[in-house]
Image (cartoon, rainbow, N blue to C red):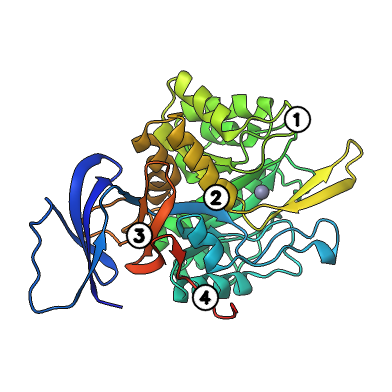
Amino acid sequence: MDMFKLIRQAKVLSPEDQGVKDILVAGEKIAAIQEPGKIKIKGLEVDLIDGSGLVAIPGFIDPHVHILGGGGEGGPATRAPEIRVEDCTLAGVTTVIGCLGTDSITRHLSSLLAKARALEIEGLSAWIYAGAYNLPAPTITGSVRSDLVLIDKVIGAGEIALSDHRSSQPTYQAFLELVAECRVGGLLGGKAGIAHLHLGDGNRGLDYLSRMVKETEIPPTQVIPTHTSRNRHLFRQALDWLNLGGFIDLTTGPEPQDEEELSVFEALKQIKAANLPLSRVTVSSDSNGSLPVFNQQGELTGLTVANQKDFLQTFQQIWRENILTRKEAIQVFSTNAAGFYKLPGKGKVQPGFEADLLLVNEAAELHYVFSRGKALMERGKLRARSTFSQ
Ligand code: ZN
């Protein structure tokens, strides 16, 4: 693998349209972006990549992934498997933020941290949330605050369950204390310190969040609710939350089965139609979490596993059907998360940024995936390999 790569004649969406350019990658970084033919390197080995006819966009950032596997709501046999670097690569995801979920008994933050480190060694960029569904939040060092200050990979707490039958039914006060831990830990640790909140179908919806903005000094940008399009009542509250200056996250997945749920497409269209800022919207896969189906009595009746294929397919459909502009689509799948979670060097195709690059065709199909300069996919062929892949 050469230290230098020159991607020639690719159309660059940084996410802004930069026209057709050559991109020089040096090690893990984008070193230069210039008019075609301008970059000349002598005396060094350079890997030349033909980008003609392709579009260079930043690698996707998936801020909600059960990298260790989630689930377990149907007993031990329903614990979902770990994610592999191959799965992420095939979806164009170069950065993940890992979380525990409902199960903080047989899953541990120390294992989550080790898994994030493993994914990094295998070629991705990975961070994690302290905590799990339940409060008080499980941590590595004793508190969310100290995890944020002392552990490089911890960038917030999540996914903390609210308004859900699987939550620990946290009081408003317990919720506030968690967000305060995130805020102060983030300040001391030089991180975003985000409280990433799982929202269930309960009627309380985002009540704790709007109350927090009214009654405390904590800014709305300290938290982000996810699964916000799971029902219409919650989505209406999510639109209000955007109006209040907050961020929201949408979860990709299979086609909605009941009419209460909105697809990501429908949610994005409504946000756009209401003239609310798409710059405060992110999308995540919930990958390797279980998708349990409960009946009216709260009994588990079915189970599948969320995956990142839906994440890529959602992007492709948005791109092909012009549901958003290309710039907006890239922002929602990468740039916004990089800014919100303060991920250094991520979310843009720009000199000095990390070389997390996707080269896609006009149908947004992946031809190349570069993650920190390493080719995880070349000419549509998967090159990424997790340690124990056959
Ligand atoms: Zn969740």
From the viewer's perspective, is residue 89 above or below residue 4?
Answer: above
Picture quarter containing residue 100? Answer: bottom right
For label 3, the residue is 356
State the separation of the CA atoms marked 3 and 1: 37 Å
Marking on residue 118: 4
Q: Nearer the viewer, mark 4 or mark 3?
A: 3
Q: Quadrant of the N terminus?
A: bottom left
Camera-side mark, 1 or 4? 1
Residue 222, horizontal then vertical, whole percent: 48, 45
- Residue 195 - label: 2
Which residue in the structure is indicated by mark 1?
258
Alpha carbon separation for disc pair 4 and 3:
18 Å
Q: Position of residue 85 (x, y in %)?
A: 52, 67
**Is tag 2's residue or tag 4's residue first in the polypeptide sequence?**
4
Q: Earlier in the sequence, mark 2 or mark 3?
A: 2
**Tag of residue 87:** none
Regarding residue 79, the answer to whether it shows in the image is yes
Judged from the image, the secondary structure of the residue bearing numbered disc 1 is: loop
Image side of residue 326 versus residue 24, left or right: right
